[in-house]
Each structure stands twice: as structure tokens, then as C-alpha cells.
Image (cartoon, rainbow, N blue to C red):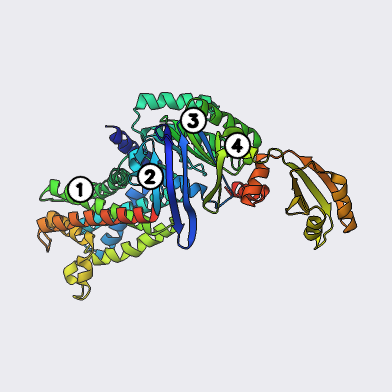
Amino acid sequence: MDKSNMDIIVQNLSKNFQAVKAVNDISFDVRSGELFGFLGPNGAGKTTTIKMMTGLARPDSGTIITAGIDCSRNPKAAQHLIGVVPDESNLYPELTGHQNLCFCASLYGIGKAEREHEARKLLEAFNLKEAANRKFGGYSKGMKRKLTIAAGIIHKPRVLFLDEPTTGIDVASARALRVLIEDLHKQGTTILLATHYIEEAQRLCDRIAFIVSGKIVAEDTVHNLLKHDEGKHFLHVSHKGKNADIAERLYARFATMSFSFLKDNTFRVESSEPIIITPIVMCLEEMGIDVSEAKRITPSLEDVFVRITGLEADTMQKDKDKQGRAK
Amino acid sequence: MKKWIAFWNILLKDMRTYYLKPPNINWGIIFPLAWTGMFLIRSGSGLDSIPALLPGLMAISILFGTTSMLAVTVTFEKKNSSFDRLLLAPISFDLLMLAKTSGAILFGIVNALIPILMASFIADIYVSSWPLLILAVFLIAVVSTFLGLLIAVAVSEVFEAQTFSNFFRFPMIFLCGLFLPVSKLPIFIRPLSYALPLTYGVDIMQGLVRGGNFMSIPISFAVLTAFCILIFGLSKHFIRKRWIT
């Protein structure tokens, strides 16, 4: 593979916290100008990976090359090329929005006139002009996230790391932030986006890696990930009541189909042939189970994620929503 | 040049955000005043005792000002993750730590100047060498600030920073010859005094203000400088080990 147009090359990266393998021998690369998604539940190793790539954590093994610089050996050497938006809005509550941006720019050696200009420009672009002279501590969550992103890009980084940029903020602010991320991508910034929102990853990313328990379990473009399910047929069934033999009896009756049992009395049917709903409903009724809903579904990235990782998509959503509320 | 822009702005930000806040300015004035008043009343010898008290007062003002301020501000920034922003800056770790501690060092120097200014108004203060006294004040401020940095690494909560600072500071008041000469301490306690950097700083000031030093001034300067390097090195080592895990 041609590595010359890669902005990030990660090879065999591992990190343990005592007995816990936080990141377990992962390898991936991100092309210049690409928006690469890291999709996984809470504790999957996304933040730890970003911390290692940005110099905030030391890898136990493996290499990280950012813009041609070996960051695993000398993380400081590439820090002028990267921007980081952490999962927490970690600017200074005592400083105003404008002061925060100017201070962040000064850390990259940007002179006074230029940083003042850039700060004003970003405040306007992020629709924070009115709040420029208000203290960061008094900002709403959405405003805080916006300003934290602005602080991450004020020095015009070649590579931007975004860790859960839309977690814990309202729908309108999240939408606005996604538009801003799309704009940065269009401008040619290489972006690594860690997120637990499947639809966000699907909408924004050129390629996605599914990360679970510190391991990358799949990595491809959204189109290719969905291609695995092309030609397959899916049915989603919700029911009331339970029967211990449900799986056994369904497999016995519909041998060519496969069944994934989810939580809350739901299961998914997968088949290479078109699925006829009636026999399945009747089979369940024979078991004394009432079917409340049975609908054919078009496979989405969420289905692919569930199938590959074995996790339920809403499990991680709930995890993160709790986290967002706690912030 | 670029790295000095970062250095200067970190220092400026800390001065504005922490050190020039009214409560800290009050602290810098009230703290030495309270100690002076207490010792003047206790000694009963009036203004004549001021030259004897001055080195101790200056040292205690620096010690209390710098250690708590740095330990608290760094712990606060670590707690709300804003310290990570500094760790991500493309400047060397040494320069970052020096920028972060410079504000507290300046705060400590100003804290030391307040007792000496006040004393010079109410008593005759003779200093054999002002440049050496300023150098001693600077080194005490540096070593106390670095001690605060070491405390910041050891704790994770802001309130711990304050209580842990006191764990070191209060014994140092009695062990480092601030108000009770080391020579008057029981002989088995003295090794502890010699293991503390403030002992050397206070001894230099005692020598310069009233000729009461019991160690050679150049040796005390050398030991104090060595303590600065040692504590800074230890702080950096522990920060790298604990904060960049």
C-alpha cells in the first residue's frame, strides 16, 4: 500500500492498564484529507488511542506515524501539526471565549495580531460572536463544545482529532457541529472522529473502524460495510410474552434463516431469501407469544455494527447519554 | 521565538487568572502582617526584634504563597483537564513546566518584598548585600514553587493539595530556622533540618540581614540551587510517569 499520502499510520498499537487491555494490537491508517471514524461503545479504547496518538498517553507497544513523524518515539515533534478536541470541554472557565481562543493560539506560537484575527474569525464562523466577551464558565454545553472545537483548529492543524464532539449537547447544536466538521473536511483537514453515534459516523465519515474491547473488528468505507448485507433480507420482530424454547423452535422450523435475539422481547431474522412474515408470526402464536410488530428492514450501518460486534447499538448510546448528562 | 510566545502567554494567563486576583493580593499583604504582629507581641521586644524576625517572615511568606498557589492551580487545571491543553502544546516539557511555575515564583518574590518594605518603614534594616538577598529570595521562591509542583503531582483533588502542602510547611517553620535557630534544635532533629531546602535559604538571609548565618553563604547558595534542580527533576519525572501514563 502506498503510504506516502497517509497522514496517520498506526501499527500494532497496544496499551494495558494493569490487567485490562485498553487497546489491543490495533493497526489502521488515515489518508491525507480523509475523515476517518472510530465507532465503538464506552470503554472500547477510542479515547486511549487518541491520547496515545496525541502524546497524552504512552503506548506499551506499536508505532504511530503522524504526517511522517514517529510520534511513538517523540510525540512533541508532531504536536504543531495536530489539533485535539477532547471529549470534555476543557477550556479555562475564568477566561472569555475570545481570551480562550487567543490563549490556545499562543500555545502554538501565533503572534498577537494574527491570533486576535483568527479568534474573531472563528467566533463569527461558530456563531459565538455575541458571547465572545463572556466567560467560558457561563457558556451552555453546546457553546462550550463549539468553542472547544474552535480552540482545536485555531492553529490550522493538518490533522484534527475529535473525541465525541457531539456528546451531551442538544440536537440543534449537534447538527450545527456536524456541519462545521463537514466544512473542515471539505477544506482538506484530515480528521479522526471518535464517536458512539452510528448515524453521525455514517453521515460524516469516509471510512469507519468498529472498535470493541480495544480491538478493531472491522474497518472499511460505509458503502463496503453495507455491501456485506447486500442481497440479504431482514425482519425485525417485537413480541409480548416469553417462551424459553423460542430460539430452538424457530431454528427447527426455519432452518434456512438465522435469528439474533436482542433485548426487550425483540429479535431479528436474517435470510438470503425473501422472508414471508405470516409463518413466523403463526409459529410464535403457537408458542403463546403475541407479536406486536413484525417489519421488514433495510440493513443499516447499525445492523452491520450489531452483526459484527455482537453489541446492541442502543447499549452504547445509553452509556454515552448517561455520560453526557454527567458532564 | 514561537516557544517564548507560548511561555509568556502561559505566564500571563496564570498571573491574570490566579495570582492577581484580589484574594491573593490580600493574602500577600495580610499574611506577613499577621505573622509580624504575632511575633512582635510574643517577643515583647518591640521594633528592635524586626531585623531578627525579617528573614523568617520573608521565608514563610514565600513558602506559604508559592506552595499552596502552585499546588492548587495545577491540581485544579489537572482536575478539569485544561492542563492537557498545555501538555498538547508544541513546546518542550521543561519550558512548559518553567512557564507554569514562573507565575508562582514571581508571586513568591512579591510576597517576600512586602515584609521587607513594611519593615524598612518602621525599623532600621541593614542588608549587607541586596543582590545576594534578592538572589536568595529568588531561589527560595523557586524551590518552594517546585515543592508545590511536587505536591500537585502527588494529589488529585484541590483540597488535598492544600492539606498536603501543610503537611510539609508547618514542620518546616520549626525545622528550617525561620524563628528558632537550627543550632538551638535538639541534635537528633538537626539532620532533618539539613535535609530541607528552606534551612539554607533562611540561613543566607539571616547572614545578610544580621550576620547570623551558621553556614557559609556560597555553600548555602550551592545547596539551595542543587535542591531546585533536584526537586524540579523529581517533579518532571513524576508528572511524566503519572500524567502521561
Q: Quick one: SS at disc 1?
A: helix
For the residue carrying disc 1, how many other residues have a C-alpha within 10 Å: few (<14), some (14-19), or many (20+)? Answer: some
Q: Quick one: SS at disc 2?
A: helix
Q: Which mark is residue B87?
A: 2
Label 4 is found on which chain of the structure? A
Query: Mark 4 or mark 3: which comes first in sequence?
Result: 3
Q: Residue at x 12, y 61 (%)?
A: B212
Question: Label 1, label 2: how many angstroms apart (C-alpha)?
Answer: 43 Å
The amino acid type of the residue labelled 2 equals: Leu
Q: Position of residue A287 (x, y in %)?
A: 87, 59
Write down the residue under mark 3: A133
Write down the residue under mark 4: A224
Q: Position of residue B160 (x, y in %)?
A: 43, 59
Label 3 is found on which chain of the structure? A
Using the image as rendered, state which of residue B114 and residue B164 is in the foreground. B164
Q: Quick one: SS at disc 3?
A: loop
For the residue carrying disc 3, how many other residues have a C-alpha within 10 Å: few (<14), some (14-19), or many (20+)? Answer: few
